[in-house]
Amino acid sequence: MSFEPTTNPYAPQPTAAPVEVQAQTQLPPQPVFQQPAKPRHALFGWAIAGFVVVGVFALALLAYLFLALGPVLLLLGGVLALIPLAIVLFGVYWIDRWEPEPRGLLIFGFLWGAVVSVVLALLVDVGVQLTTAASGVDTDVLDVVGTVIQAPVVEESAKGLGVLLIFLVARKYFDGPVDGIVYAAVVAGGFAFTENILYFSQAMAYSGLISGDTLLTFFVRGIMSPFAHAMFTSMTGLFIGLWGRKSVAGGVGGFFVGLIPAMALHALWNGTSYLGLIGWFLLYVVLQVPLFAAAIVLVVQLRKREAKLTQERLAEYANAGWLSPSEVATLGTGAGRKQAMTWARAHGLAPLMKGYIRDATTLAFTRQRIITGRDRIGAQRDEQELLGKLTASRQALQAAARPAV
């Protein structure tokens, strides 16, 4: 069976598999699994520095929240804020299932949003208030400007910087627009979590623990619009991912371009708060719901594109003898992966199968890095390591599947 993948004719093709490996791929189709890959520490230094910075900001933010809200309201607000956070994280999990991002980067992104972005926004807000306090400008005007202009500009810049930082430091794990959306949604989810703690706690402080205002605040922010911040910041992540597929400069340019729709959507959302409750609900139905639906359609199409790319890249390894056609069909389609996981669960090998699927997907995107010329030397080194793992997995499978004598 021959594959005709779409590829760059000037990019180096996969090296032919050794004869013994090609012989393995000619055996009857079998599910393939492997031992879990050992953790890698290429970003260890950057990770330590990043988490130290986040830790310092976290201590300052926690002290501020403790003094401003008190321990009881802080705890209650935090518990309520976990509900919309769980909704957002489930959405991120759904988007990120095909090619999962490193857990450490996702945690860092969340902490950047929940801590660093919030602190930066608070510092700017304090500076603006001090600057305008003696200006004599009408407070109502300042309130509108702060809500519709200052908040979108400052908050989207602060959140977007977290996504850009991940792109610059861990570009190896930033493969395209889907990755940009995932990292942006995690950062935004963290920001919304802390912001919701403030809103919910303040509502309880002013109106009581169980009051109409508190319930309305929770319903509007926690149930009707948990993805608001994620949708705004995803515009920045989308453009970083699109423009950064070939160069760092492209990703930086995508950051500035993506901020424009992110800020515009944020400003539009904040502006609806001045329309009154009925006006807000009407605009929510007429504008926000269609925008959210369009975002879902976009994500679905991007995920399909990832699956197609995976199958095309793995097909090149099949033509070189590293994989069998049946393995490409298994690893490159959702139905094939589901069937493989069903088999693995029946044999107690689910974690091993997950690792195999993950490494095969990583191999496909590593191949894409080689084709586009992005970190070609590093990608070719990773390619050889991953091919070795896949070969070892096949050998382990054949040993496990061989009938006992």
Image (cartoon, helix red, strand yellow):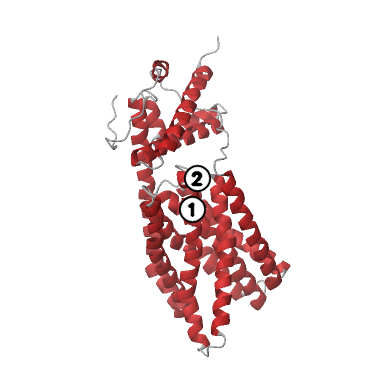
Q: Position of residue 255 (x, y in %)?
A: 41, 59
Please name the residue shown 34% across and 31% down the image.
315
Q: Quadrant of residue 237?
A: bottom left
Instruction: Say which residue label 2 marks.
Output: 101
Q: Position of residue 314 (x, y in %)?
A: 37, 32
In the visual, does 405 lie left or right of 96?
right
Amino acid type, callout 2:
Glu
Q: Quadrant of the N terminus?
A: top left
Q: Is residue 110 visible?
A: yes
Question: Which of the numbered marks, if any, corresponds to residue 132?
Answer: none
Q: Residue at x 48, y 85 (%)?
A: 141
Residue found 52% across the figure and 17% down from its top:
399
Q: Is residue 28 left or right of residue 215?
A: left
Give the residue type that dot 1 points to: Tyr
Callout 1 crowding tier (Cα within 10 Å): few <14, some 14–19, many ≥20: many
For the residue pair 19 and 332, the one nearer the viewer reads as 19
Residue 183's disc is 1
Q: Residue furthest right?
A: 71
- The image quarter containing residue 376 is top left
Which percent across, then down, holds residue 387?
Answer: 45, 28
Report crowding for label 2: few under 14, some 14 to 19, many 20 or more residues within 10 A (C-alpha): some
Q: Of callouts 2 and 1, which one flags the residue occurring earlier in the amino acid sequence?
A: 2
| Residue sticking out furthest to the top | 405
Residue 148, image x and y in percent? 45, 76
Asked if labels 1 and 2 touch by Cβ distance under 8 angstroms, the answer is yes
Placement of the C terminus among the 4 image quadrants = top right
The residues tagged by marks 2 and 1 sit, at their Cα atoms, a distance apart of 9 Å
Is disc 2 placed on a helix, strand or loop?
Answer: loop
- The one of 262 and 202 positioned closer to us in this rendering: 262
Q: Residue at x 42, y 37 (%)?
A: 366
**Could you say which is closer to the camera, residue 170 or residue 63?**
170
Secondary structure of the residue carrying tag 1 is: helix
